[in-house]
Image (cartoon, rainbow, N blue to C red):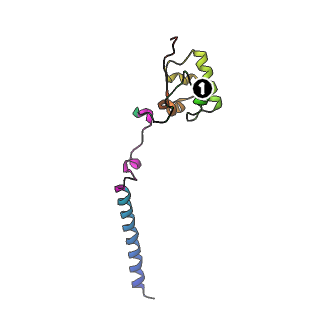
Amino acid sequence: MNMKNDGHRDKRYAAFLLLAGILLSVFFIAAGRVAISRFFMPTASPAATGLVPEFPGFPIDINTASREDMMMLPGVGVKTAERIIEKRAELGGFKSIDDLLEVEHFGGAKLGAVRALVTVKRLAGR
């Protein structure tokens, strides 16, 4: 067995893999499929950037939303939606989005997840 040829084959294979990886990376970056900043920079939440996602029906008004509307929010199920509606009735309506923190089992993390998807409009009697 000729050791010289086996050594060259290994080096050529490694060089081929390196070149293929570089070419694929350049292709994906040039095609706009991979944003380098996505890997090296933390992404901000829509609430932090002030951008509201463009989903039909959003943002929803938590002073007039039904239980089903509330359940479309991330992390809000049947019980949480019912608690929100109960707290809304107890308070006579929410004055700000931060009033959701008064709802049982509704913490800062959940508030952060829904902040960009909800709004509070003034009620007619207020």
Q: Is residue 105 left or right of residue 4?
A: right
In percent of width and height, residue 61 lies at 52, 24
> Which residue is denoted by mark 1 in the rendering?
66
Residue at x 63% of width, y 21% of height: 86
Q: Quadrant of residue 89?
A: top right
Chain part drawn in magenta: 29-48
Q: Is residue 19 above or below residue 117?
A: below
In percent of width and height, residue 11 lies at 39, 75
Residue at x 55% of width, y 17% of height: 93
In percent of width and height, residue 31 lies at 36, 55
Q: Is residue 7 left or right of residue 122?
A: left
Residue extending farthest to the right is 79
Q: Quadrant of residue 74?
A: top right
- Which sits in the foreground, 39 or 1? 39
Q: Is residue 10 above or below residue 19?
A: below
Query: What amino acid is found at the position of numbered circle 1 in the picture?
Result: Ser
Residue extending farthest to the top is 125
